[in-house]
Amino acid sequence: MLSAGAECVFMGLFLYISGVGANSICALKGSSVDLHCSAQRPKSSRKWFTVRWEDNKKVQDQIFADGKRVNISEESNFTITINDLRESDKNTYCCSDVDDKRNKCQRGEIQLLVADLQVKVFPATGEKTVSLMCSSSCPLTESPVVYIWYKNTEFLYQDSSPWYQELISSEESVTYSCALKGYEHLRAPEVSVASLTSACFTVTYAKGRMCSNQQRPEDEPCSITYPREVQVHVQKTKVRGHFKLACNTSCPQTEAQTITWYKNRRLEQEPRSVLSSSPHSYSCAVEHLFSDEVCIQDQYCSRVNYVNRRICALQGSSVNISSEYSDPYYQQSKSKSWYKNRRSDMAAGEELIKSTDRIKFHGVMNSHILTIKKLNKNDSAEYIFRIRSNAGRWPAVPGVTLVVTDLRVKFSPSAEEVTEGQRVTLTCRTSCPLTDNMNYIWYLNNQPLNLTKTQSKYLVLDPVSSEHAGNYSCKVKMLQKSSLQKMLTVHRRRKWTQAAIRIVVLLLVVIPTSIFLWIRRKMTSIQSPRTETSFNLEEPWSSVREHLGSTNRGG
């Protein structure tokens, strides 16, 4: 079942599919990338090549600079720059010495991956809500990455988390998009969510790779109906010792061509019949929504699943990251470990997690739990559980993505100075949608506000008055730490003076009268064209000034 435990597959999925490694570079489609030469010979003999396989042999094709899209700089150690990156630039590159026939391209190969951005939609724990993620098809090498979110093409906010900070309900007329800071011109295609039920939800993509998966041109819009739950069903067949697998979804509208199968976490054709003693694990997916892994019989194969694949937690709180696994009886291993993988630092790789005062492990039957207390921003990462029996044999199943967020007060309208009578909404904002329903406490000048209604993350001041001015902060009821204060300045509404009111009234009387006199004079002079031509158009306004002057003297 695609519960909260399988609602999200983060960047790790793309890692093992695309083979991102230490000598790989992932750059954004449409951007520029520099590849540095590692050859040791004199500069004059260095050349750049692409590497491909042909008849089980490596073939090198030399790259020539065109001075526009591809440039090679001898002054910068033969660095090659590729501008306006395209899908066709995805390749393996190397810089080598032309005269070195034996070792040409044996060392320093660089795998270049070209990523595009896509807003992906995942079912949330609420029955009629979804969460959004700004996703790239490979983990971007450039760091740190700052994500920018747009709603109906208008800028919303920017943050280091790829997750949209709110849960979304069905709003067909509202579109969302995202971009990376510095690459705002390379926005992800807009998406909208509609027909959100407890079983299905429909996403409309303006364009992009999700549409190409539907066998449609990438530049055309498309709509895909997703299930909220996906599960692999194991069924006995008439043949003894054989089982049939079926990919079941919660949504009858799910199209068969959107379903893909995986064996040992690698893409596979739909399995027709599987032996009961099969050592393989199986899973299925509808686009980016994956089921849990299953074994025909747990004693014969290894599998790892997670209770929650996406966790949003507050700074200072505690979190439990739970895994469920099976280990073949003939390969029982005592080595069960958790690893931390910070996708923003690809060079660091996976880090083995050790028990400390803040970090603890608990194992119960076929479950293993990682507990982290007093969370801080450095805890934001992907957490992977491994058992030694399957380490190195198959690609690692994508782990649990933990995003640690603080609280911040946001004003809408965004100006910190407002005028009495306006409607002002305050939001206790987080970098990601919190997993659990929270009770919030609002403070004005460090004093808690006693609100009659249940306190939520929103505080509405309608109409706002000078009494509402001050420093606002918020916190979650179960935690001690509150957000930083943010000041709201409320200006009094300007009142009209008596003199201004009298001037306006006089203008309303004098101007129509002057216009009437001017029209009357024009009609009386219709017999004399020359007089009409030489008529001073400033004359009606002189009478206005005379009336205003007499009024001021009289006042």
Image: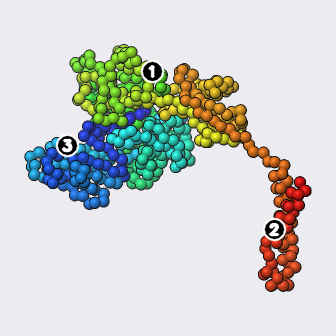
Q: Quadrant of the N terminus?
A: top left
Q: Check disc 1: other Cα within 10 Å, few if <14, some if 14-19, many if 20+.
A: few
Question: Label 1, on which residue?
Answer: 374
Disc 3 from disc 1: Cα separation: 42 Å
Q: Nearer the viewer, residue 219 or 542?
A: 542
The circle on residue 108 is 3
The circle on residue 541 is 2
SS at circle 2: helix
- If you read the primary sequence from the N terminus, does the residue marked by circle 2 or circle 1 appear first? 1
Q: Nearer the viewer, residue 68 or 540?
A: 540
Q: Nearer the viewer, residue 406 or 263?
A: 406
SS at circle 1: loop
Q: Is residue 105 left or right of residue 399?
A: left
SS at circle 3: loop
Q: Given the image, on which type of amino acid does mark 1 rest?
A: Lys
Residue 125 coordinates in the image, percent (x, y): 49, 30
Name the residue rendered at 63%, 36% in the picture. 488
Residue 251 coordinates in the image, percent (x, y): 46, 37
Marks 2 and 1 in Cβ contact (< 8 Å)? no
